[in-house]
Amino acid sequence: MNDGTIPLCEDERETPNPLKNLAPVIMVKRFLSNGFWLMFLAAFIYSIGDVFIKILSTSLPITEVAFVRFLFGGVILWPILSSLGTSLRGRHLPYLILRGVFGTFSFLCLLRSMAMTSLSISMVLFYTFPIFAAFFSFLLIGETIGKKEMGFILMGLIGIYILINPGSQAFNMGYLFGLLASCLGGISMVMIRKARETNGAFIIYFYFCMVGGVLTFPFFVSNFRMPNLQQWVLLLFLGLSLLVAQVMMNQGFKFWRAAEGSLLLMSELVFAGIAGILIFKDPVTFHFLLGAALIVGSGLGLNWVTQRSQPSLGMARLSISRSKGDPLS
């Protein structure tokens, strides 16, 4: 039956649209060049990792959680670096090794803090690391601390005092482990900045995983506890989530300025806080809100001062991530 349409010739019917197959590739490329969404999703995925860490830190030895996380990161990165033709021989090894040592102990202290106190408080205390990074930058590599930086440091210290409220009955050792994780993370940040002068971000992260694996392996063996199926799944997703977030953060800083990037990464605290309240029933008190606001403001202010005075450093003082021990700035 002729419906009045003009039939296509055979060649026209079979000619494929070349743009149709390229559409997914174009979408992926656009996403990988969108700094806002890369940073925002990196912060969100980091907060998911925080939830996994909180659950695992209360049910397995912290050295076991840490070792599996380091092993996973190293095993995944090795073939990636090899396929890219990247040499695994880092430059200025002392900085890479020291970064790994301080980053490892920072991560272990964070795990201990999460096991002893709420997820919200642990994360806020950990995010005081810009204060320690500024101090150790002055102490170890001779960077100056200006009046504005001193003001933000004082603001952060006041926030710490208000948050932990040492005179209250709610105070516990988890607060001190959170601060120790931040302090060690600040030193690790200084080592990263020195290592970053001659090493790529993935090499720094790879050495972090290797050093962390070596340091935690003896304790992993002596304190090993066989995880159940649920714990194995959480360990797997913890390693995967931290690695994906690291890569997304590293990619995001190619297209997003440090000041905006710092603000977006700070959204991890919001996501982790919401998770703590909804999943772990973390209490929300006036001391917590006021202290957290001062600490977050201090970190953002320090990064703003650093960005204005030394733009090339970018996110150097805030990208510790994940030390949670392992920044990929």
Image (cartoon, rainbow, N blue to C red):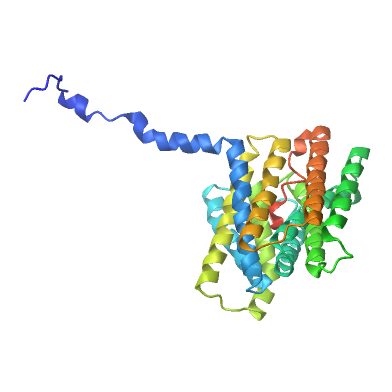
The quarter of the displayed image where residue 235 is located: bottom right
Q: Is residue 98 above or below residue 230?
A: above
Residue lying furthest bottom = 222
- Is 255 on the left or on the right of 263, as rendered? left
Q: Nearer the viewer, residue 4 or 307?
A: 4
Residue at 81% in and 69% down = 173
The quarter of the displayed image where residue 276 is located: bottom right
Please provide percent x and percent y for residue 322: 69, 53
- Is 182 on the left or on the right of 145, as rendered? left
Q: Nearer the viewer, residue 88 or 185?
A: 185
Residue at 57% in and 51% down = 244
Q: Is residue 283 above or below residue 13?
A: below
Q: Nearer the viewer, residue 264 or 119?
A: 119
Residue at 60% in and 56% down = 48
- Is 26 on the left or on the right of 36, as rendered? left
Residue lying furthest left = 1
Q: Nearer the viewer, residue 57 or 64?
A: 57
Residue 129 in sight: no
Please provide percent x and percent y for residue 128: 80, 52
How many numbered dots are placed on residues in this image?
Answer: 0
Residue 58 in sight: yes
Please provide percent x and percent y for residue 69: 61, 63
Q: Is residue 316 above or below residue 243?
A: above
Q: Quadrant of the C terminus?
A: top right
Q: Quadrant of the N terminus?
A: top left
Q: Is residue 6 above or below residue 242?
A: above
